Amino acid sequence: MQSKKPLLGLCPIGKFVFSNEDAIRFKSRLQELLREWDVRFTDLEGVLEDGLVKEQAHVDAAVEHFHAAGIDALFMPHCNFGTEGAVGMIARKLDVPVLLWGPRDEAPLPDGSRLRDSLCGLFASSNVLHKMRIPFTYIENCRIDEPPLRKGVDTFLRAVNVASALRKGVRIGHIGQRIDFFWTTIINEGELLDRFRVEVLPLDMLDFVAASHDRAYRGRAGYEKELRELRKTTTLEDFPDLTPMVNVLAMRDQMLALVNDNGLEALAVQEFTSLVDAMGAYCCFAESLVGDTVTIAYESDIHGAISNILVQRASLGAEPAFLSEFVIRHPDNDNAGCVWHAGAPLSMADPDDTVRVGRHWILPSPLSGMTHFRLKQGAVTLARFDGDRGEYVLAYGDAHTCDGPHTQNNYVWVEVDDWPHWERTLMEGPFIHHMAMNYGHHTAALTEACRYIPGLTSIPLNQ
C-alpha cells in the first residue's frame, strides 16, 4: 500500500516588528515537535537568516529551496506576527496545500508591551490567501503543547496524502473490461484523466489468464506446498483436486507482478465469468491475498478503486480498504446495515472467525473459491468517489461495527449516526452500492483533502 508520508515544507513566518528571539524560540520548538511526531520535513535553516521568512525579499530563496526539495505541503507557522505578502507569494508559487497556525499569545509584559501578535498576523495572512484564491487549512490559535496542534498537523498530512492522489495522479490497472449488465460502473475514463490525473491501464484478459496459467505450471510444486500449509489455518471446501487453487495462487502472483511492473496503486477486476471459467474457481481468495498489498476493486468499478485509494491514503497506508456493499438494513437496529462482499483483505478477518473458501451461495455453480469470513470489529470509515456529467463528489462518514446476525461471504454490521440520512443521501446522489471501507475514523482528513482537489465536492454523511 502507498504509505510514504508527505514531505512537509516548514516555512516559519516572522516580521521585523516584535521579538525576533521569541520567533526563533517557537520555530525551534516546532522543529523538535515535528521530529518527535516523526514528520518528514525540510526547513529554511541555512537558507535564510534565523530560518525565518521576515520580509518579501525572502520569497524567492524560500521558493527555490522548497521546489528543489520537492515538498508535498507547506506549513507556515506565524512565530511572532506575519509577513502576509510573502505568505501569499510563497503559497502561490509553490502551489501545494498550505497549513496555517500560530502560538497563542501570552499576556502583555508588565510594561504593557507584547512579544508577539501571532493571532493578528494570522488574520492578515488568511485574508491574503483568500484574495489570491489559495486554499488552506487552519489550526486554531492554541499553545504549542496543546492537543489541537498535533491533531491538526496529523489531519493535514493525511489530507495532503489523500489529495495528492488526484492532484499528482495515480495508475489503476483494469483486468478485462466492464461486463454488460454492470451499468453502474460505466465511467468517463477521459474525464478522470483530464480532471484528476487518474490513468486507467487496460490489461488484456487473455494475456492475464495465459500468464497466470504459465505461473501455475512452472511453480506448481511451490504452490502445492503453500496449499498444504494453508489448510492448517483455512478451510478449503469442494475442490476435487488442487489445480483450481494452484491457479488462484498463481493469479495472485500475476496481479502483484503487474502492480510492480506498471507502478499501479489499485487494480479493478472484471471478476466473472471469464476468470472463473479460465481458473476453474472463483478467484476471490486471490484478491483477499493481494488486498493487503494493493487495493482491489471488483466488477470493473474504477470509481470504487479510486474510493479505496482515498481512504487508504487517509490512513497513511496503515489500513487496507475493502470495497464493500450496503446490502440490507439491520433487522433490529434502525441505524445499522450490513456491509458485504467477497475478497476482503485477510487482515480484516475477525480473529475469532475461520477463513473459509467455498461455493457461491447466490449463483448456482459447481465451482468453489468464494471467501467466507466475518470482518473484525472497530471504528470504520466509509467513502464513495463518484460522479457523472462532469460533476464529481466524495461522500464519506464515520461509523462503528456492531453485533448482527450471521451471513455469508465477507461481512460486518455497521452502525451510523442517522441511517435514514445516509440512505437518502446515497440514494439521491450519483452513487452506487459499493463503498470503500477501512478501519479508523478518517473523515476529518477527507474533508480537508477536498479543499485541495479542484472539481471535487465533499458530501459528509454524518449529521
Image (cartoon, helix red, strand yellow):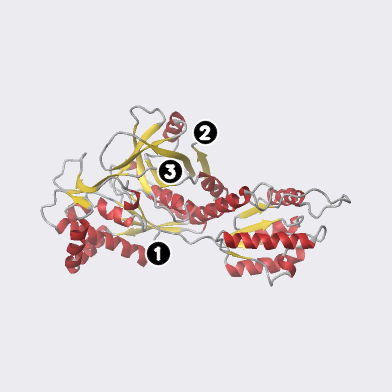
Residue that extends furthest to the right in the rendered view of this protein: 111
140 shown above or below 335? below
- How crowded pointer 3 is (Cα within 10 Å; few <14, some 14-19, many 20+) is rated as many
- Earlier in the chain: of badge 3 and badge 2, it is 3
- How crowded pointer 1 is (Cα within 10 Å; few <14, some 14-19, many 20+) is rated as few
Position of the N terminus by quadrant: bottom left
Disc marking residue 206: none
Amino acid type, residue under disc 3 in the picture: Val
> Disc 1 vs disc 2: Cβ atoms closer than 8 Å?
no
Foreground residue, 235 or 433?
A: 235
CA–CA distance in space, label 3 to label 2: 16 Å
Amino acid type, residue under disc 1 in the picture: Gly
Residue that extends furthest to the left in the rendered view of this protein: 240
Residue that extends furthest to the bottom in the rendered view of this protein: 46
Q: Secondary structure at mark 1?
A: loop
Q: Secondary structure at mark 3?
A: strand
**Going by the image, does 149 lie left or right of 284?**
right
Residue 94 visible in the current orientation: no
Residue that extends furthest to the front in the rendered view of this protein: 110
- How crowded pointer 2 is (Cα within 10 Å; few <14, some 14-19, many 20+) is rated as few
Disc marking residue 463: 2
Q: Secondary structure at mark 2?
A: loop
Foreground residue, 424 or 133?
A: 424
CA–CA distance in space, label 1 to label 2: 38 Å
Amino acid type, residue under disc 2 in the picture: Gln
353 shown above or below 221? above
Give the residue displayed 58% in from the left and 50% down from the top.
Answer: 151
**Going by the image, does 389 lie left or right of 63?**
left
Please tell me how many numbered marks the rendered image carries: 3
- The residue beneath circle 1 is 263
* Foreground: disc 3 or disc 2: 3
Disc marking residue 380: 3
